[in-house]
Structure formats: structure tokens, C-alpha cells
Image (cartoon, rainbow, N blue to C red):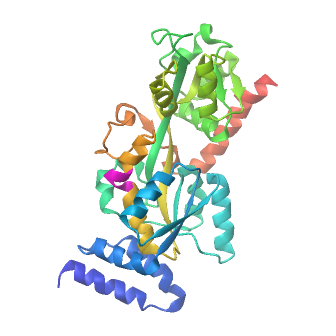
Amino acid sequence: MRTSAVLGLAMLATLAAAPGTRAQLAVETIANYAGLDRQRILEQGARREGSLLLYTTGTQIKPLVDRFEQKYPFVKVELARASSADTARKVIEEYRAGFEKVDAFELASHGLVVPRDEGILQPFRSPELAAFATEAVEPARHWVVVRESYTGIGFNTKLLPAERAPKSYLDLLDAQWRGKMAISGVSTTAVNWVGTMLIAQGPEFVRKLGTQNIRIYNLTGRALANLMTAGEVVLSPTIYNSHVAASAEKGAPLGWHSPGPVPVTDSGVAIARKAPHPHAAMLFVDFLMSREGQVLYQELGYDSPRTDAGKASAGARLERLYLTNRPNYIREYEDWAKLYQDVFVRRRI
């Protein structure tokens, strides 16, 4: 009997399981099905399901949803938008209350860590996985990074020519930059920046950098880049390459250097363990990971961890740190946050 036929029979057996376990087993089986008839099975199941509920952030996903619905007009995607942290809290509360309506996620990976640890995410396989950098895949395949950008040294090129701008973490300790740097005070940006420097340079370096009288703006990286364009900020080591590239294309006087290992700010795609519409969810996962989906992300200004995406990713030239893949990320994040407060925030009070 052919492998695909055997797996197809296994799926039928799963669907005939006891009612208490049937839905969960079906999601696990569908999420990991690898038969030759996989695409046909997913499409047939998605036609029956007719919709999926996606938990996501912002509006950046809309062009991809529109293209997905054009490709699969029998699936209607419902979006529920909130920050990654709020979404993580929401889905944990929902699952504890037995409200299991979400099918898939497109969230910053730091917002997927706790739902993963709570057993809410279903590991999955996709034929698209082979084209992705290994480090962009959560070790147990709970999510795959589908869009990313990198925090590095941004500067106003009118006020600070590229040849004079610092090019490494160690360069930031030069006395000439004392009082001239600013950072984004958004928690994940600032804390992951500190964590990266701890990994790359050690705690003593971070404490020395804290003596450089760095200004803290409680603004997003995008807003800080806008201040840099206006000349209010000359230099910042917490600027995203994607923001610089997008603004520079429009004539903004911005430049960017990679100082060494850079933290990856990413969003991953994941499927819920009790997804009511698992066929549609896996079709959506496949689409976001596909070359077509990754090119769309690139057109929106993001980098791609896919090795054969349409435009060469800046990440291919960088030493990237996918911090949320570290086995003790939550505990480390708490330690990094304390160090950030001690060295950069309380020092200024």
C-alpha cells in the first residue's frame, strides 16, 4: 500500500477516535500530514471548514490575507488584532475557560513562548520548511519565523557621515558619543538589545555603556527613526534596518551599521492545538511560508528567513540572534530587564 494511502487511513482512524480526544488528534494529524495527497486533503477539508480565525498584530498581514483569499476563495479569514503580549494573555485565558476558537497565529515570537509552554500551540510540518534557515524554526516546530528585521546602529547621515559613525558595539564606548546617543524604551526592543550585548560582550561592557549618558525615548523604533530623520536624534543603537531602508528609499538621511551579532525582531506563524479549522489553518501556514508569501512580506519592507525569497535578505549578511529560541529565554529576559533598569533607567533618575 502506498505511503500516502496508509497515512490517509490513519487520518480516518483519527477522525473516528473518542469524542473527547478526536478534535485534538485530528489537529495533530492534519498539522503533520506528509502524504503525496496533502494539498488535496487540505483543500478539501478547508472547503468544508470555510473559514479560519487568526490572532495577529497590526495591519501588516492584510495584503497577505487578501492574496490568500484570492488563492483559496472558499476560505474566509477572520482577524483578531492585539499586541503580542495581550494576545498571549487572551488565548491562555480562553483555553483555561474552554473557549477554543482560534485557529492560527501570526505574532512576535516572544508572544508565542508562553502559549507554547501552556500547551496551546501544535507542532507542525510543512513542505515549505526545507527552504527556511534552521534557526528561524522553533526547535520543536511550534512556530516558524515568517518576517523579521534587525536592531543595529542607526544615524542621521547629514549630521554624522557613515565613515564617522560607530560600526561596532565596542565603538559605542568612545568618549565622543557620550550624551549623543538615544535608545527606544519599548520594553522588548530595549531588553533584547541588552541581552544581545550580554551574549556578545558580557555584563561589564553593558555597565560601561551605561556611563555614556544615553537618552531613553519611550517610543517605538519607527518613531525614533522619524526623530532621527528630523535631526532631533543623531545616533541610536536600537534602530531597525527595515525602518532605515524604507525611509532612505524616500530620501531620508538615514544610515545603518550592523555592530556584530544583532537581535532578530520577528513574527512567527503557529497553529492552535485545538484549532476548529485545522485544514484551513495549515493552508494559511503554508501560504505565509511559501516563496509567494515571503516575497509579499519583503514588498512590505520586512526581511525573510527563507533562503530562496525573491529579494536578497539583509539577514544573510548578518550574524542573527533568534533570542526566543534560547531554552531559558523567559528567565533570561527577566534578568536582562533588571539589568536594563539598573544600568540605563535608574542611572538617569
Query: What residue sits 41% from the left and 48% below the top?
Result: 136
> Which percent across, then down, holds residue 21?
51, 85
Residue 158 sits in which quadrant?
top right
In this rendering, would 144 be left or right of 108? left
Pick the residue in front: 187 or 140: 187
Residue 259 appears in view: no
In this view, which residue lies farthest toward the left? 1
Question: Magenta stretch: residue 253 in it?
Answer: no
Residue 289 sits in which quadrant?
bottom left
Residue 12 appears in view: yes
> Which percent across, then down, holds residue 39?
30, 71
In this view, which residue lies farthest toward the right? 349
Quarter of the image containing the C terminus?
top right
With respect to residue 196, does 229 lie above or below?
above
Question: Magenta stretch: residue 291 in it?
Answer: yes
Query: What residue sits 47% from the left and 17% below the top?
Result: 167
Q: How many marks?
A: 0
Pick the residue in front: 259 or 333: 259
Pick the residue in front: 247 or 348: 247
With respect to residue 202, does 14 lie above or below?
below
> Which percent across, then down, holds residue 200?
50, 30
Query: What residue sits 41% from the left and 61% below the top?
Result: 68
With respect to residue 333, does 315 lie above or below?
above
Quarter of the image containing the N terminus?
bottom left
Q: Main secondary structure of the magenta part?
A: helix
Query: What residue sits 44% from the left and 90% below the top?
Result: 17
> Which percent across, then down, holds residue 8?
29, 83
Q: Which residues are magenta?
A: 289-293
